[in-house]
Amino acid sequence: MLKKYAVAALLVLTFTVLASIQVTMAEPEKEAADVLILKGSPFGPVKFPHKAHVERVGGKCETCHHASKPEKPATQPQQACRDCHTKPAVAPMKTITQAAFHNPLAKSGTCIDCHLKENAAGKKAPTKCMECHKKSNG
């Protein structure tokens, strides 16, 4: 009789562990904030309307965010750029924080390329440093 209880308890424990693993794996991805403040630039922080950008690209995160790299695998589905891109760059990374957004003169890069394209299409997107970087955003 004791053997039956031990088997039953083991089955319940196994089921509980498997169910908790499945629930953990099925957790929905955490949504990013509507507005992010990107700090660290000497020109001033950038108030980044994340939700508006997500809507603009139709919810396609890969428009701005690259896939995880083998030399520095992501540790979560939605990871902040600064988790990998730091100043100074820490091996194995080579791209510093600022370069993750645009080149040193802000003439090309992820953000500015899209802003220039939007302006060419007749829409208004900031392209000058101080239109994004403002001390008041801190």
Image: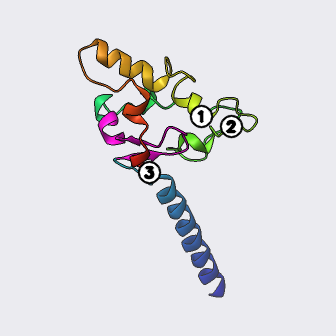
Residue under circle 2?
A: 72
Evaluate whether residue 66 shows in this view. Answer: no
Q: In percent of the image, x 73 and y 39: which residue is there?
A: 90
Q: Indicate whether 92 appears above or below 16.
A: above
Residue under circle 3?
A: 138
Give the residue type that dot 3 points to.
Gly
| Residue 42 in magenta stretch | yes
Out of 9 and 125, give the one closest to the viewer: 125
Q: In percent of the image, x 55 and y 44: which residue is there?
A: 40
Say which mark, if any, is on residue 68. Answer: 1
Give the class, few, some or many, for how many residues have Cα within 10 Å of label 2's Cα (few <14, many ≥20): few
Name the element at disc 3. loop
State which tag comes first along the sequence, 3 or 2. 2
Give the residue type that dot 1 points to.
Ser
Q: Position of residue 121 (x, y in %)?
A: 26, 13
Query: Where does the magenta region start and end?
Result: 35-54
Task: Tell me the quadrant of the picture where the N terminus can be found.
Answer: bottom right
Answer whether labels 2 and 1 touch (C-beta < 8 Å). Answer: yes
Q: In percent of the image, x 76 and y 36: which residue is there?
A: 91
Spatial separation of the CA atoms under disc 3 and disc 2: 29 Å
Spatial separation of the CA atoms under disc 2 and disc 1: 7 Å
Left or right: 18 as drawn, with respect to 35: right
